[in-house]
Image (cartoon, helix red, strand yellow):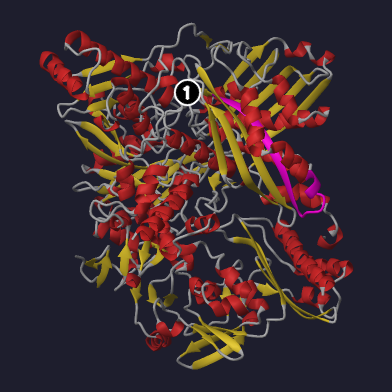
Amino acid sequence: MKEGCPAIDFMVNGERRTVQAAPMKRLLDVLREDLLLTGTKEGCGEGECGSCSVRMNGELVNSCLVPVLQAQGASIETVEGLACDAELHPLQRAFLQCGGAQCGICTPGMLIAATHLLAKNPNPTMAEIREGLAGNLCRCTGFIKIFESVVAAAAQTRGEAHAR
Amino acid sequence: MSTHAKTRIVGASVPRKEGLDKLLGRARYVDDIELEGMWYGATVRSSVPRGFIREIRFDRNEDWNEFAVATAADIPGANQIHLIFSDQPCLADGKVNHCDEAIVLLAHPDKHRVREAVNAVQIEYEPLPAIFTMEESERQDVIVWGADNLLKSFLLQKGDVDSVWAEAAHIVKGEYRTGAQEHLYIENNGMIAAYSTEDGVTVWGSLQCPYYVHKSLLAVFDLPEGKVRVVQTETGGAFGGKEDYPSTLAAHAALLAMKSGHPVKMVYDRMEDLAATTKRHPSRVRHKTALDASGKLLAMDIEVTTDGGAYSTLSSTVLSRATLHSPGPYVCPNVRVQSRSWATNTVPYGAFRGFGAPQAIFAIERHMDEIAAAIGMDPVELRRRNFLHDGDTTATEQVMREPVILDKLLDRALAESGYLEKRARFALENQSSPVKRGMGIAAFYHGSGFTGSGERYLNSLAGVEVTAEGKVRVLVSSTEFGQGTNTILTQIAAEAIGLGYDDVEMAPPDTQIVPNSGPTVASRTSMVVGRLIERACQQLVSELKKHARLDEDFTREEFLAACERLRNAKGEVVSLVRYEPPPNVFWDDQKYRGEAYPAYAWSIHVAQVAVDTVTYAAEVEDFWSVQEVGRVLNPVLAAGQIEGGIAQGIGYALYEKVLLQNGHMANNQMTNYIMPTAEDIPPIHVVFEEIPFGYGAYGAKGIGELPHDGPAPAILNAIRDATGVRFDSIPLLPEDLFAKLGALQSIEQAATV
Amino acid sequence: MRGNANAHELIAPGSLGAVLELLANEPGKWTPIAGGTELMVAHAVGRLNAPKLVSLWNVRDLRFVDVRAESLAIGAGSTFRDLRSNPQVTADFPLLAQASTWIGAIANQNRATVGGNLVNASPAADSSPALLVYDAEVELISVRGKRRVPYFDFHTGYKKTILAPDELMLAVHLPRRFGEHRQYLRKVGTRRAMAISKVALAGTALIKSGLVSEVRVAAASLAAFPARLYNTESALLGKAVTPEVIRLARQALLAEAQPIDDIRSTAEYRRRVGANLLEEFLQQLAADGTAA
């Protein structure tokens, strides 16, 4: 714990966490350095690539552009919180099956952006998928397999909901 | 020879081997690793493109006792980055030859302090004249490298081009240019190093070729082989950009580890990575082509020129591949390729997916459309009349022994894309629409594996072992950085032995554990290394049958039991094999004649492009890629390679511009170096035709680089089709389209003055 | 990451009043930060010249969209997601809703605020052209009180505004009187998303008896700040949109635009594409005229 830094309380992946950090420290760095949640990646540091995407109070944000003070009291979701115990999130399953991840560095952010997209819109059109993921740069896949993964996950999720 | 009987696992889209770790966010990239007592490194770089270093001043307000500082004087061995030649220093010593060249290294326990301290080191220079273009370099008014600025040249000759010009029905000339391109892997370059006198140097980092880094560190630290260890961490994209540069960064981190007595992490931020690391070579290719009255090629006189940057790095081999791909997939009795790579005062250009081929193929495939226009022939028909077929010879007089099915690929591509119908329809619609649409094609090959005798020199060693835990472990230095190395080599081993996918694992990419199976480059992993694994597995099974009582047909349990018998007898269960070239392969390095590549992958690209005459922006609306890459080992991964390569090729053609100012990349931020987003990439339709290659793993040829070769010419050909205007250089930005198209719509020229 | 978090103070007083007190007590010493999409980028590259920052994020009095009889009041702390998903904005001010979708991508729209976009005063600001052609007023607040100013008077130079050191932008007011207007908006960026505009143009026009009775044209990246193109408007006002009038309006735009060459584009390209966008708008007006 650092002297002189305020304590910041928030929920991360459903768990209450408290850190002492400089208020201008990026949420990204707090996640990676203070909480050792290194699934969230830094690609550009300027909100351009989306590798650091997390959800804050249910909204997709670039954690590199969030001073941690602004996350005070917030609920944060990162890639580490997607799978439930041993059960993969439908998007994780779909990415695995459809080849949505290659080098994997954009994958955590991409998964979070896709999760956000499907949370807001369970049946997105291709145009909506493209818009929903436009802030997440992938240099490996050409995005096509990522789109296919999102379509597959959406179909699966709707199917599961229907089955219930 | 491989057998091509029915396979169980090869050819199936099994999920990526390390996929789960990546999807759960637990894959460990270099920046995710923290070591006990670790310090952080930073680099003081040159701010001038060329000059003598007169003084290095350390600001007195900084307490330098807290820092580790390294300069060229601290290098225990040779101050050089070992690649093909050794002209590039590890740290500039007395002189700099490009902006952003490393001069001083700093390390500190606090990563912010070390960043700030970079600004507290002042370098005083005596500037020297600098040059920034290949034209300035070839003029040789200012010599910045060697005796003449010439990094490398090749002359390839077949027949006698000069005997043809007089009798030719048509002679068509053209000049084509390509710009630099940044890899833009999403994970920046990064390395952690540790040093001790007992163990020597260990580095962990984001890299493609552990043994390149290994060899380079041996020289910099003057250590015996056992005292350098290189471990690849999960690598977040590479594309050739982590082929040569990691050797430099590893040496830097290791020097700081040596000086500080602590492990040191150096991870570049995006601005530093963009400014200081390699890019694709800019090129200029001139074609002079003779044809007979029927449109058959008679002579191709080609001049390939590349800008190599300040040091030679891999420019010679990139130039070689550009040379060999410059005549395209066509038959021509008389060919001359004169190629040269020139030094300039920019960051050295290096390896990038395609390795010279995209530049050369851009030129020939753009040129084919210009020839077609000049002689009044349909561009598809012109290509068809000149395609290589089985039995034909290439420019290096290599006989095409394997089937060549360009006609079939072309037919398929035309049919899938609706090329003919769309061309006709767009021609009509364009008359009244502000958006002009067009269709363009490109036909090309990509040589798999190292050029010429390269694979023989590499003499790769790879294999498998069976662990005490009952897993088959693949032993290769071939690395995973997204392309699927782990998955396909696992598939090959499982297939070859007769085990399940989960029975096979990859050995850690650590030079203390894996043999040197060569670098992970040149579309060689599936074909060359995969074949080594296939052979090693066959060798293991046959040894088990001979010496460990394994029956002809066996179950998994019987196999593992036999392995235990062998282990008890020999102490280990390992099978390693060395590269063996296919028979009857001949290559003359001097004359550039013979079997340039053991195999070729073939492809036809079709682009549908829309040019908006309001904004002068060209967008790719739809894209088709038909290719023959031998046996497809994993269809989902293979299609992913094709799609990703095409996306990068679209960026190369229409979006990505490296803006140099005084030799420094001025747009070194992701917000200013523009790669296509999810909204910019069109649907991509991928079709494979499979003809198994006799000397690749289960018939595989190379695949990774091929798809980057075709998009740029296909797109610019489509723009020509759409607008009737030729564009001969990339990147082709809206501003460049405006320069030509805007002039045509000159309704208010008077008003603008 | 080149900035050092320890070198900056950041506080979040929570209420608008407390923020204004702070600004009043030490005018010019505090830099307000809302969604961070601009300042945190500067921070990352080590160019954040702001030792003391005060957070406006989650200040409730700044984040609202109020529908009033004559106008729509948008709190300066409203994010672009707030705007694009607001039915009243979409219905009455479609150009603003459309411009809101241009901001970076979803993650940026969730954080970037309309006040931040305007106060940052980039010549390329995405929301500005739409606000200019809707006759927006900006409401500024300090402990001294409130003032309302036409938005077209807000920018005074490159990255300069009339905002006093102790002031915040409180709201943007849009008169609800553009329902009958023909409206146009187009951005030309470096790519389809995550793009900074090379040029963007907005237009609103009211056609009465075949003549242009009201017209507003505004552009981003055609001058040192987002601005109305008054000479271009003059060339149209009171006229029927004929090919000759379109030609004259283009000429007016080409003459009054003052774009620059920079890392993203060229002045000449911006000028000509600006004129092309204007022509596209006017062709639509002309076509509507013939249809009616």
| In this rendering, position of residue B191 left or right of residue B469 | right
Whether residue C203 is visible, yes or no, is yes
Residue C144 place in picture, x, y as percent: 48, 93
Identity of the residue drawn at 21% across and 46% down: B35
Point out the residue furthest to the left here: B568
Residue B729 place in picture, x, y as percent: 68, 39
- The magenta stretch is B427-446
Relative height, residue B295 to residue C101 (above, below): above
**Dominant secondary-structure state across the stretch colored magenta:** strand
Q: Quadrant of the C terminus of chain A?
A: bottom left
Identify the image quadrant of residue A102.
top left
Queried whether the magenta region covers residue B437, the answer comes back as yes
Residue A1 place in picture, x, y as percent: 19, 65
Queried whether the magenta region covers residue B105, the answer comes back as no
Residue type, mark 1 in image? Lys
Identify the image quadrant of residue A14.
bottom left
Relative height, residue B695 to residue A75 (above, below): above
Question: Disc 1 on helix, strand or loop?
Answer: loop
Give the chain of mark 1: B
Relative height, residue B96 to residue B490 (above, below): below
Query: Circle 1 is placed at which residue position?
Result: B701
Identity of the residue drawn at 41% across and 83% down: C60
| Front-lying residue, B202 or A93 | A93
Identify the image quadrant of residue B485.
top left
